Every structure is written in C-alpha cells, then in structure tokens.
Image: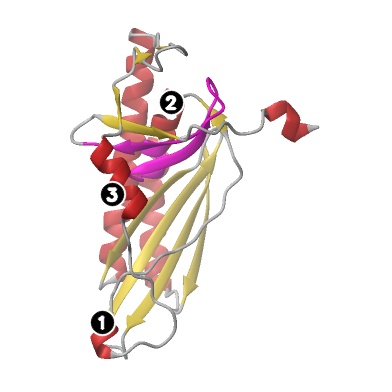
Amino acid sequence: MDTSIVGVGVGITDRFRTVVEEKAVRVEHLAPRAQSLDVKVTHRAYHNGRMEDSTVELTLTGKGPLVRAEAVDGDKFAALDIAVDKLAEQLRRAKDKRIDARKHPRGATFDKETGSIEGVDVEPASVDLLRAVATGEVPILTGVVDDDDYTPVVIRTKKFDAEWMTVEDAVDRMELVGHDFFLFIDARTDHPSVVYRRKGWDYGVISLTAAAPPLEQLAS
C-alpha cells in the first residue's frame, strides 16, 4: 500500500513520516486490498494566533468506495492517533456489516404508494427537524472580524457528482467516510435525499419531493 503525506501550513518531519508508516501497517492489516493511504495535515491559527490546532485527514483508496477519517488536536501526533482509531473502527464496522449481510441478506422494499421502506432500520425525519433545517442559521467567517463578532465556526464547501444508490448503500457509504450524513440520489425514486445518523444504530432519511433527471438522460 502506497502512503503519501501532505502538509498545509506545517512542515512534515521525518519523525512524523516514520509514525505514519507504522500506523499504515495497522491500516493495511485491516484493509489488505487497499491501494493507497493519503494523509493531509493542516495547521490552523485562529484569531491572531491565540488558538492553534492540527487537523489530520486520512483517505484510504482501493477497490470499492473511499474510506475517510478526520481528527483535530493541538498536537498533530495526537490527531493522527485519533484519526487512525476512527479509520480502524470504520473498517471493522464495514467488515461486520458484510459478514452480517451474508448471514442475513437484505430484503428491503419500497412502496411507492405509501412511501414506506421495509427491511431497513431507517426512520423518516421529524417535522421539527425539517423545520430546523429550513430555518436554521449558522454564522460564517468572512474576512477579518472584530472580537465581538468572532466565532470559531468555519463552513467548508464541497461539491460532488450525483450518485444513484439505495438507502441501504447510502448508509454504508456514510459509515465508511465517518460522517453523520450522506447525500445521494435515491435509485428507487430519483429523489435527491440525505441519510443521517440518529441515536445508537438508528438512521433517518430526508428526501426532496422534486425528482432528479434520470441517469440515462444525464448520460445522453
């Protein structure tokens, strides 16, 4: 398995590279078919240097979907340890799900008339949650701000190509990337949807009523 390390705002020392290579052995043991492990270390100083932290992002690529994990700590070595633990846990859970799927094949069905999903442990979003999503406001940092207006909240914007998949596959992908939600196009309805994590092993799903263009139309 190939390993690459990139530093943003921080230098990568030989000691850190050595520790990464040692951690990579553990990851490769859990994912023997993995082809590469990308490590990105980002150092940030907030508000005139009063706060500093290091973010370590791990991306594991190979046959199948990407697996990602991220951790933040004042020390980049500690952040690396946390990120590797998260990645290892995601790989173990994915393996357990594959074993369970072989023993208990999924038989999820979708009723277009009622909109109900059977055979998968997913609950629709509540009215209160939908209202909170529609009306919620999150402050965004834009340029230099005064002390009274300072907030540590930073919003990162990412764009991805639309992917058609089932709700069950979306839940699996969410687990692999270590997020609390996952955006996708429901293959059964062509509706833009998002699955999200609830308490324990429960999940919710939110779908827009407007359907996305069929995949065949986009390919033409």
Span shown in magenta: 174-198
Q: Residues within 10 Å of mark 1 (few under 14, many from 20)?
A: few
Disc on the earlier residue, 3 or 1: 1
Residues 111 and 89: in front is 111
> How is the model colour-coded?
secondary structure
Q: Which amino acid does label 1 sit on?
A: Met
Label 3 sits on residue: 132
Label 2 sits on residue: 167
Residues 27 and 189: in front is 189
> Is 31 placed left or right of 121 in the picture?
right
Disc on the earlier residue, 3 or 2: 3
Q: Distance between the residues labelled 3 and 2?
A: 23 Å
Q: Where is residue 158 in the image (x, y as percent from the top left)?
A: 52, 57
Disc on the earlier residue, 2 or 1: 1
Quarter placement of the C terminus: top right
Query: Which residue is at 35% across, 44% downward?
Result: 178
> Is 62 placed left or right of 118 in the picture?
right
Residues 106 and 181: in front is 181
Residue 104: image quadrant is top left
Query: Which residue is at 43% across, 26% downward?
Result: 167
Q: How far apart are marks 2 and 1 (CA)?
A: 40 Å
Q: Where is residue 182 in the image (x, y as percent from the top left)?
A: 42, 40
- For label 1, the SS is strand
Q: How far apart are marks 3 and 1 (CA)?
A: 31 Å
Q: How crowded is mark 2: few (under 14 residues within 10 Å), some or many (20 or more)?
A: many
Q: Position of residue 216 (x, y in %)?
A: 73, 26
Q: Where is residue 197 in the image (x, y as percent from the top left)?
A: 29, 38
Query: Which residue is at 36% across, 30% downward?
Result: 94
Give the label on residue 51, or none. Answer: 1
Q: Which amino acid does label 2 sit on?
A: Val
Q: Which amino acid does label 3 sit on?
A: Ala
